[in-house]
Image (cartoon, rainbow, N blue to C red):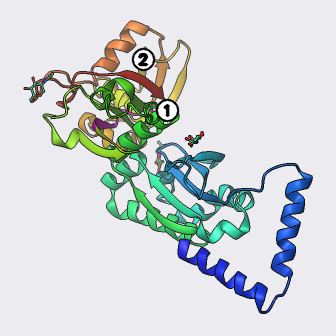
Amino acid sequence: MEDIKDSNENSCTRNILVILGFSCVISVIVLIAVGISQNKPLPQNVKYGIVLDAGSSHTSLYIYSWPSEKENDTGIVQQIEECQVAGPGISKYAQKLQEIGDYLAECMEKTRDVIPVSKHHETPVYLGATAGMRLLRMESEQLADRVIDAVIRTLSTYPFNFQGATIITGQEEGAYGWITINYLLGSFFQNSGWFSGISEKMNHEKTFGALDLGGASTQITFVPENHTMESPENSLQFRLYGKDYYVYTHSFLCYGKDQALWQKLAKDIQVSSDRSLRDPCFHTGYKKVVNVSDLYKTPCTKKFKRTLPFDEFQIQGTGNYEQCQQSILELFNTGDCPYSQCAFNGIYLPPIQGNFEVSL
Ligand SMILES: *[C@@H]1O[C@H](CO)[C@@H](O)[C@H](O)[C@H]1NC(C)=O
Ligand SMILES: *[C@@H]1O[C@H](CO)[C@@H](O)[C@H](O)[C@H]1NC(C)=O
Ligand SMILES: *[C@@H]1O[C@H](CO)[C@@H](O)[C@H](O)[C@H]1NC(C)=O
């Protein structure tokens, strides 16, 4: 991209001298005039980037910008626009692939208007899908591939520099959440002055942990006291702004709020002989019909599956906090732990460390 820009500038320089005479000069004068009349400094050379966050329950589009010349060697990124895609998450389009184009169109058209046309071709677009697509891939790799292919075809039709659409791993999701939280809270810059070397060992006290509750998964990520971790798959290491970070992360698939509810319903209907399920987690008087084939479609309810003598059942809320809490706790197996310490379901968890920031 830099090469393209530079060669454009070079050819513009030549054009001034040889062919176009004064049109470049005129535009410079116009720019200066605008700058003076608005009493503002000339606009910096700004770059843009587009990220689509394809969550399990919905997709959001974010537009970022940053000055192309890094200030003091550190890129300051700003979010300049956010667009919520109307509709559910992309995994729900597995059976209607032809609708994905329309689904993304509104936000992508808005993006065309926000980013100056001259920057379109150099503006990267990237889509990352999370646990909703991880679950669809567990159901059917072919269906998940088709959804991603349809997304790629759609995003490639726009004039931006399409960089890819992928299902990110739970580790990546945990790491990105942690980096975002700590970037926004300024953890990476607080000691960028002359005493940064001295406090290298104190990193864990100066970063926030991140607990990210999604629709299909939940991530926990923090810097533990001990660099050496018992479970390598929960260990991440990266270098940011000149410093090394050793991070613990885990993504609990099926423990986002929507999938946890499916799990609870499947567990409770397992022991019910009735078409109606009295549920303490819903308020008294609440009624809702649940489709059994929908309930068993997600891989998250597999371990509770049994053949039921009906296709639908009805939830009847009884509104009892203690009973609800008891019922929810049954989804967390805290018995077996192959490590010195576990979160639940046999997943390693080092001692919790640092301040926690909760993002929804
Ligand atoms: C960059 O460094 C200069 C001089 O040290 C300082 O005045 C300026 O505020 C810094 N800019 C940022 C964004 O930190
Ligand atoms: C750090 O981990 C090592 C190896 O697992 C262990 O022997 C040591 O006690 C741990 N230190 C702390 C402070 O937890
Ligand atoms: C349950 O949902 C499926 C689609 O997921 C549908 O085909 C089926 O007819 C529904 N069953 C009932 C009893 O409504």
Which residue corresponds to the image point at 14% horizontal and 21% vertical from the top-left?
Answer: 335
Which residue corresponds to the image point at 58% horizontal and 57% vertical from the top-left?
Answer: 69
Residue 96 seen in render: no
Task: Classify mark 2: helix, strand or loop.
Answer: strand
Judged from this view, the residue extending furthest toward the bottom is: 18
Residue 163, relative to residue 274: is it above or below?
below
Tag 1: amino acid: Gly
Q: Residues within 10 Å of mark 1 (few under 14, many from 20)?
A: few
In the image, residue 57 lies in the stretch drawn in magenta: no
Tag 2: amino acid: Arg
Residue 231 seen in render: yes
State which image quarter holds ligand 1.
Answer: top right
Query: Magenta span covers which residues?
Result: 246-257
Report, in whole angstroms, how far the alpha carbon at label 2 lies from the one at label 1. Answer: 47 Å
Label 1: which residue?
Answer: 186
Task: Classify mark 1: helix, strand or loop.
Answer: loop
Q: Which mark is residue 278?
A: 2
